Amino acid sequence: MKAIAVEPGAGEPTVVERPLPEPSDGEALVRTLRVGVDGTDHEVIAGHHGEVPPGEDRLVLGHEAVGVVEDPNGTDLEEGDYVVPTVRRPPNGTNEYFERGEPDMAREGEYLERGIVGAHGFMAEYFTSPAETLVPIPERLAHLGFLVEPISVSEKAIEHAVASRSAFEWEPETALVLGNGSLGLLTLAMCEETLGFDRTYCLGRRDRPDPTIDIVEKLGATYVDSRETPVPEIPDAYESVDFVYEATGYAKHAFETIEALAPNGVGALLGVPESWSFEVDGGRLHREFVLQNKALVGSVNSNRGHFEAATDTLEGLPEWLFDDLVTGVYGLDEYERAFETGDDVVKTAVEFSSLE
């Protein structure tokens, strides 16, 4: 079978031949339909993130997948079921995090991530996976199933942010998304369409005309150009916000989020920055935390429950959003286009087999 693999940091993704996988007990064989491309894939390609499986020199990419069950192999799944795979797997047998159904909370070194860290991904014509890691989705969502994984990441981050405010009556009205990439735009849509925020903002650094700014404004949100209005100035230029979702990986934003928050507000940090030393007024930020009851939470990955919630969220988002957001779905004969970047690229995917 064909797969898309890369030697992290040493080349571009390429199509390789790999043997058809055989499911072990408790696993199903899945025919891959579509696999999304995101920033993590580009980080793996560049060698900034990720790790090949032991004893191998290439990693099969892809962690945002949707497929159809080809062989249930005695599991509770049925042939023809449409499924989305979760990402994390235990490194050697199992451990307490996986036993509790909380792989997303496992410490570094106590998990593998398909297509990212130590385990081949889903950018192949077929893959196998334990049945409990395959989340069924309706057939009507199959063409968009590769968006379930990124939405699930936001489901978790929002869940944890809300949980941090559960000790008191918290009624947020405003939200700010830092980053107008595909993850930021999906989260902005969640804030607008499903979470019920009254006013939303999205920060980026792009010039008009731009498709992401068009999406921001079509959602009814306000676009904030960080070159004109940096995060700490947002309260004066617009208003302080109750919830900040950071998806940029820009290290200063973690600290600037504190300044943008309204009293009792919470920020969720998801970007993964490279090392960078700079000065901050630690005393002032500390006072903001204490005197204004603010909070920051870090979040990464997601578990099966978040995938299930993401499926419901996906179905509730407007159809026009996907028409504007997904700027390209490419077959194996032109897979390179799915990895291209540019101002006209928002979200892409590789299609391995027909949805029909």
Image: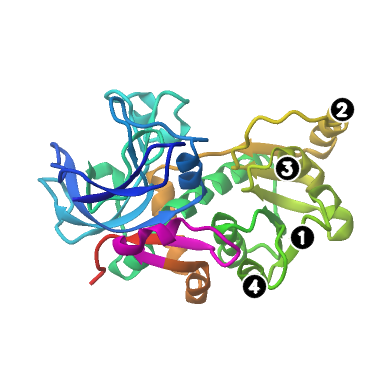
Let me know if residue 311 appears in the view.
no
Q: Nearer the viewer, mark 3 or mark 1?
A: 1
The span picked out in magenta is: 329-348
Can you identify the residue that label 2 sits on? 283
Which picture quadrant has residue 120? top left
What residue is shown at x 32% (from left), y 31% (from top)? Answer: 57
What residue is shown at x 78% (from left), y 38% (from top)? Answer: 293
Marked residue nearer the N-terminal end (2 or 4): 4
Query: Seen in the image, is 203 located left or right of residue 92?
Result: right
Q: Secondary structure at mark 2?
A: helix
Above or below 4: residue 273:
above
Residue 339 is inside the magenta segment = yes
Marked residue nearer the N-terminal end (3 or 1): 1
Can you identify the residue that label 1 sits on? 225
Q: Position of residue 330 (x, y in %)?
A: 37, 65
Q: Amino acid at mark 2?
A: Gly
Query: Seen in the image, is 45 located left or right of residue 280?
Result: left
> Does the residue at mark 1 contact the one at mark 2 (Cβ under 8 Å)?
no
Can you identify the residue that label 3 sits on? 253
Residue in front for this viewpoint, 64 or 268: 64
Q: Secondary structure at mark 4?
A: helix
Can you identify the residue that label 4 sits on? 214
Task: Tell me the crowding category of disc 3: few under 14, some 14 to 19, or many 20 or more residues within 10 angstroms, Cα based.
Answer: many
Residue 298 is inside the magenta segment = no
Q: Nearer the viewer, mark 2 or mark 4?
A: 4
Q: Amino acid at mark 4?
A: Asp
Which mark identifies residue 118? none
